[in-house]
Amino acid sequence: MGGSHDLEFTSFPNDVLRHMVSFLPLEQAVRTSILSSRWRAIWLPEQFTTGEVEEIAAMLLRPAAVHHIWKLCFLTGDETVHILARKGVSGEVRLEFEEMQEEMTSFRLKLEPEVSAGGFSSSVRTLHLRSVNNLGKDFSSTLFSRCQFLESLKLQHCRGLQILDLEANDCLRSMEVSDCPEMENITISARNLHFFSYQGVTPLIQLKNTSKLIEVSLDFDGLRENTEFDSEDAVALLASLQEMLTLTIKGWFLECLCSAGVIFRWLEFKLNKLKELYWIDSHMNKRNRDSLACFLNICPSLEKLHIKIDPSRNRVPCPFFHHYLHEPHLWMDNATVECNTSELKHLKMVEVLGYTEEEDQLLLMNLLLKKGDKLDSITVTSRENRSWQVAKTPHSQLKQTWNWNDGNKESKKSFFALLMEDFLGFLYPAKAGLCYNTF
């Protein structure tokens, strides 16, 4: 088409444009506001002021034919609560509470289902609460209690929130908590919860009635000020995760456990169902490398291991412990660490992201290749996004492998960039060596 037959989307009325973008997921639809001032105009929030909390809750719970965005305003006691609310056609509700300018007040948030819904059926399937404060906690609890069919809950950036109590019905499948810097205690009871993610300072986390929990992410970012690391609570948390298949864990957390005296081999439980492990941290040194090797002793069924070294992450020092009851091989020579690490009979895949040619990373790869019966190679990716395959090669074939690469200057150069020839004997003094192939 051309000339007068062209259709300009921006010439359509706001209602038509909003109906069109409502075929997109809510988050993508809202991003159209950056296209032009015309698109931005359809996302100007509607003002909704009322003295009735129930009226606002009912509006958010009703089904929507198009995406909506409101500025909500209501009274609680003598204070006014302001919320930026977005509601999508697929049952997604996002609430961002106005951050309080006055001195922060610590509070507790209790979320539990309503005993009787009074015949009203909620359309909300996903609820995202951001910056909940002391004034907004009661409204958040009220709204949650009415969401009988809620499947996903996100709680983010809630300053002052210290205690979170969550009791959910059988519909809730996913729960995420992040960036709540005063968090002290989280208690969750959700029989059909499949996914739980936490990012922030280390709180006490108690998971009850969560036997169907199969994927967990624990991205602990140090301790709150004037608090200590409690290894008993940390072990109890791991013991409650015996049904999970996938775990993401911070290297700092494992280092703290080992430094505090936890001997993984002596624990009364193992993570027998764990198939996939994601290890994340800002760096890798001897202490967190050995802590990972120690933790693998309770992961007998592990098949996939992902190691991500990301210097952009916050580097958190391990706290000082007055007692030294950790496993005898920790912080000692590499040969002793190897002798005390269990065989990984099911390990098939290992990838290392953020490789920096440091000795501790090389020694860890050497350990994994030796202990992984089914592991033939490791995928290594540098910070410059260059990738290699690191493979086990018998010494009898090492010379032949080197001759094969001798004619390829780039492969030879990459080989030397990763591992000096005289370092091979140190890594594999017995019968094996490492071979690097670029791709």
Image: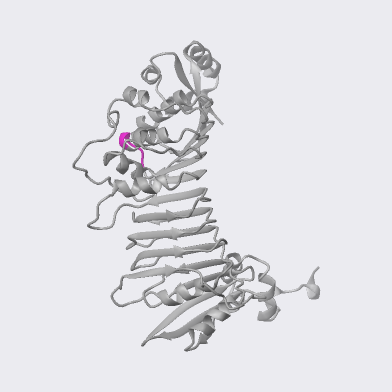
User: Quick one: which residue is furthest to the front in this view?
Assistant: 115
**Front residue (pair 35, 396):** 396
Q: Residue 361 sits in which quadrant?
A: top left
Instruction: Tell which of 324 and 72 is nearer to you.
Output: 324
> Is 377 situated above or below 399?
below
Q: For residue 163, which quarter of the picture?
A: bottom left
Residue 44 visible, this orientation: no
Q: Main SS type for the magenta part?
A: loop
**Quarter of the figure that contains the C terminus:** top right
In the rendered image, residue 245, in percent from the top left (x then y), is placed at: 52, 43
Instruction: Name the outermost residue toward the left.
Output: 322
Q: Position of residue 331 (x, y in %)?
A: 28, 31
Residue 121 vs residue 157: left or right? right
Q: Quadrant of the N terminus?
A: bottom right
Above-or-below relation of 403 to 161: above
Which residue: 31% across, 42% down?
257
Which scheme is used to colour this image of the protein? one colour
The answer to whether residue 260 is magenta is no
Q: Where is residue 222 drawn, in percent x and y?
A: 31, 52
Residue drawn at the location 66% of the way across and 71% of the way down? 22
* Rendered location of residue 233, percent (x, y): 33, 50
Query: Residue visible at 43% across and 29% down?
Result: 365
| Quarter of the figure with residue 91 | bottom right
Q: Is residue 319 above or below residue 43?
A: above
The span picked out in magenta is 283-287
Asked whether, in this view, residue 157 is left or right of residue 16, the answer is left
With 236 as the anchor, is 140 left or right in this view? right
